[in-house]
Image (tube, rainbow, N blue to C red):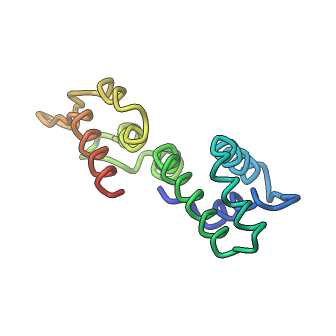
Amino acid sequence: MSPDEKTILGWKKYWDSDPKFDGPQEENEYLEFEKFCSARPERIREINEASTQGNISLSETLKQYLITDYIRATHGKRSREIIEQDWNGKIKYRDIDLTIEFAELCFSHSDDAIKIQYLDKRLTCGPEVFACLPLIAAILRIADIIER
């Protein structure tokens, strides 16, 4: 669920006067982070103010906090993408492929809580073996809240 170092370096280009990108994926990541930042003008003002006053340490710390907030806000989506991309067909119980369900569970804990009710309440995982995805999603959501 954590972004790789290259992705984070791409986000940090937000503070470059003329950012250069290593391809369309990095630019798209940058643009998503830019949208996130533009919705937090007070935080950006604090960062710029600290930098202008020569308090580079505070400015860098505030930037890291903002990036951490972005990671926290987007990790559900990122985990779903990673699972679909790197784990497709590899998450199985016996002969049942659960990759899609697992990806949706990961995404669900950062989506609107009300949406977990639409997950399969009786997912067949094998003969006489069922999983209640809303229950698993609720447990994951609680664990995520406790972790903070």
Query: Image quarter for residue 55?
Result: bottom right
Q: Residue furthest top?
A: 118
Q: How many marks?
A: 0
Q: Is residue 146 left or right of residue 79?
A: left
Q: Which residue is at the far front?
A: 53
65 versus 119 height, above or below:
below
Left or right of 143: which side holds 1?
A: right
What residue is at 34 percent from the left and 26 percent from the top? 114
Q: Is 52 situated above or below 121?
A: below
Compared with 53, 23 (above or below) is above
* Quadrant of residue 116 within the rendered picture: top left
Which residue is at 65% across, 60% downward?
7
Q: Is residue 99 left or right of residue 66?
A: left
Q: Which residue: 36% across, 40% down? A: 105
Left or right: 28 as drawn, with respect to 16: left
Question: Can you give x and y, in whole percent of width and height, for residue 138 in the image?
Answer: 26, 39
41 or 130, nearer to the observer: 41
Q: Position of residue 140 (x, y in %)?
A: 29, 46
Q: Residue furthest left?
A: 128
| Residue for point 61% across, 63% down | 62
The location of residue 60, given as percent across then percent down, is: 65, 70
Q: Position of residue 26 (x, y in %)?
A: 73, 54
Q: Quadrant of the image for the C terminus?
A: bottom left
